[in-house]
Amino acid sequence: MDICYIKLKKNMKTTSNSENEKLIRQVYAVAETKDSKAFADLFTEDGYFYDVSAGVKYYGNDIGKTVDIYATAFPDMHRELIEFYVKDDENLVIVELTLNGTQNGPLALPVGIIPPTGKAMVTPCCDVFHIENGRVKSFHCYTAGTIMLGQLGILGNLGAALQH
């Protein structure tokens, strides 16, 4: 077991009574409805969404683009929330989850667009939220991008690029 994970588990608690956890559950619920404006409205005025695997930060109304991108690529997108780690005294919530869906639409990435593959994904993800005055100040999304691309068949020709 990872030492960082052990420290995290020791110093954080999972709770269902936390206002911070309720807010983050609302963030996911709104994303499931594919309402990008309502999603962005859950952030502070200077808040942001950081898609770490893509290397892109979104601010203001652009925060909703993340919902639109995944809703377009995965019309059946569902987030399976596995575990919440809440540190209320620091307004910090960390969530382990999976992103699940079938890529039946184009997936827009900063480097280009992946046409629909028709393949399903169950991609591990870890999200880190900082909360300020009952709204999201920052949302860092650590999607396992290589796993997702592998499940979609995008990395299938990786062998040709490797040196032996």
Image (cartoon, rainbow, N blue to C red):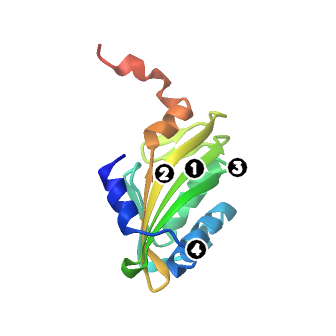
Q: In which quarter of the image is residue 79?
A: bottom right
| Residue under numbered circle 1 | 99
Q: Going from the N terminus, do you reach mark 3 or mark 2 first? A: 3
Spatial CA distance of label 4 from label 1 is 22 Å
Is residue 106 among what the camera can see? Answer: yes
- Can you tell which mark lies on residue 123? none
Q: Which amino acid does label 1 sit on?
A: Leu
Query: Mark 2 and 1 residues: CB-CB less than 8 Å, in contact?
Result: yes
Residue type at tag 2: Cys
| Left or right of residue 4: residue 20 | right
Whether 90 is drawn above or below 158: the answer is below
161 left or right of 100 in image: left
Q: Quadrant of the C terminus?
A: top left
Cα–Cα span, label 3 and label 1: 10 Å
User: How far is mark 2 from mark 4, CA to CA?
Assistant: 21 Å
Q: How far apart are marks 3 and 2 (CA)?
A: 17 Å
* Amino acid on which the number 4 mark rests in the picture: Ser
> Which badge, 3 or 4, comes first in the chain's sequence?
4
Q: On screen, 106 above or below 9?
A: above
Q: What mark, if any, has residue 125 been given in the picture?
A: 2
Residue 52: % across, % down: 39, 54
Label 3 or label 1, whichever comes before in sequence order: 3
Q: Is mark 1 on a helix, strand or loop?
A: strand
Q: Which SS class for mark 4?
A: loop
How crowded pointer 2 is (Cα within 10 Å; few <14, some 14-19, many 20+) is rated as: many
Of badges 4 and 1, the one in the foreground is 4
Q: Which of marks 4 and 1 is nearer the N terminus?
A: 4
| Tag 2 secondary structure | strand
Give the residue displayed 45% in from the left and 69% down from the top.
13
- Image: 119 above or below 101: above
The residue indicated by pointer 4 is: 16
